[in-house]
Amino acid sequence: MSDNKIGVLVMSYGTPASLDEVESYYTHIRRGNPPTPEMLADLTGRYEAIVGGVFPLRENTDAQVAGLQAVLDRNAPGQYQCYQGLKHAVPYIEDGVSAMAADGIQEAVGIVLAPHYSVMSVGSYIKRAQEAAAEQGITMRFVEEYHLHPKLIAALTSRVQAGLQKFGAQTPAAEIKVLFSAHSLPERILELKDPYPQQLLASSAAIAEGAGVSNWQFTWQSAGRTREPWLGPDILDTLQEIRTEGTTHVLIAPIGFVSDHLEVLYDIDIEAKDVAAKLDLKLERIEMLNTDPLYMETLADSVQSAQERG
Ligand code: FEC
């Protein structure tokens, strides 16, 4: 079908299709090591707690891929064809590359639905896609990051502004602490001079400036349950700390994520809210990007620039 179309491999984390698949999904995340029964029960419980076991990430990823395709079709009719490749669920990254090959695609651009680069996150998606593309004889280029794309920053800035309104007109913005957050990673990324922490701080600063917010800080969330140390401070400790310092209102902006999924709907909306309630801290969260038109344009611009750069 190709007619020299350029493939676009849109990569995302992946989620189980049903509660029955949580164990195999968790085993995949743990690089083939099955979780203990306690770990499995804990994760299953978290999925059950968010909207009764429905897995919103799958639908959101589908909608984001369709949204990106629509913008590419508008910008460059007939030139690009999107494919999905997931890190921990079907269709895996390798399946997406095989689908491109089956359609006769010879050239492709890869992009991850995560704006900040770490060798352990985006870098690992790219490595798998690159290896699969080499096997299939597809030439691939990659978007490594888009954390300061002006349209992404504009979309997040307006979400922070809307989030501040959630506390009501009687709460002055200066009384609200904005906590930007992202998925923690093992501390050893620091030895690798990984750009991830700096990129997250750069996005946070740009959004805070755009929204006119001076009372903000950055914190980590959702650290994995492994033996090695993960980047901190963790959001649950940060909530405690800012409360001790006198903060009464907090707006969480999970800018490392682009979708409603477990790490937001459970880790923020249930776990962090519960801690905040015990601390008598009013907590709100910004809306996630999902298919925000500015986010879709950020992805399309990034794909087209990578292709044009060659
Ligand atoms: O909604 C869903 O079904 C999926 C939610 C989800 C997202 C997500 C994003 C990231 N992760 C990243 C790194 C790690 C590392 C480990 C790890 C573990 C888990 C577990 C679950 C999980 N992650 Fe995830 N992650 C999501 C879900 N993640 C479930 C396993 C249980 C747990 O620890 O909570 C540790 C692996 C190990 O054991 O060695 C590392 C990074 C991101 C953000 C970038 C991206 O989206 O790729 C980085 C969404």
Image (cartoon, grey):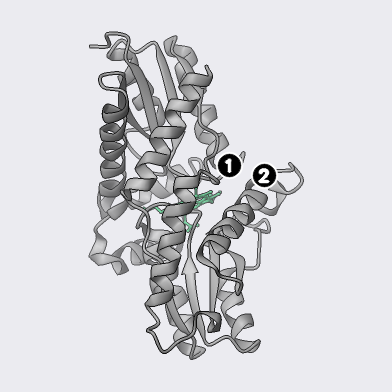
Q: Residue at x 25, y 48 (%)?
A: 59
Comparing 262 with 175, the one in front is: 175
Question: Can residue 131 be seen from the camera position used here?
Answer: no
Residue 225 screen position, x and y as percent: 55, 59
- Residue under pointer 1: 117
Label 2: element kind: loop
Decide: is 111 above or below 242.
above
Q: What type is the residue that disc 2 sits on?
A: Pro
Judge: label 1 CB < 8 Å from ligand 1: no
When the figure is inspected, residue 37 is found, relative to residue 115, above or below; the finding is below
In the image, farthest residue toward the right: 191
The amino acid sitting under disc 1 is: Tyr
Q: Are marks 2 and 1 in contact (CB under 8 Å)?
A: yes
Crowding at dot 1, Cα within 10 Å, few <14 / some 14-19 / many 20+, comes out as many
Count residues near mark 2 (Cα–Cα under 10 Å), then give few for <14, some for 14-19, many for 20+: some
Under circle 1, the secondary element is loop
Quarter of the rendering occupied by the N terminus: top left
Image disc number at residue 227? none
Residue depicted at x 40% and y 82%: 167
Q: Who comes first in sequence, dot 2 or dot 1?
A: 1
Report x, y in % for residue 143: 51, 31
Q: CA distance from mark 2 to mark 1?
A: 7 Å
Q: State left or right for residue 264 relative to residue 174.
A: left
Q: Nearer the viewer, residue 62 or 92?
A: 62
Q: Which residue is mark 2?
A: 195
Q: State the residue at coordinates (39%, 76%).
A: 165
**x, y percentage for residue 16?**
31, 48
Percent position (x, y) of residue 134? 49, 14
Query: Does residue 4 appear in the picture of this structure?
Result: yes
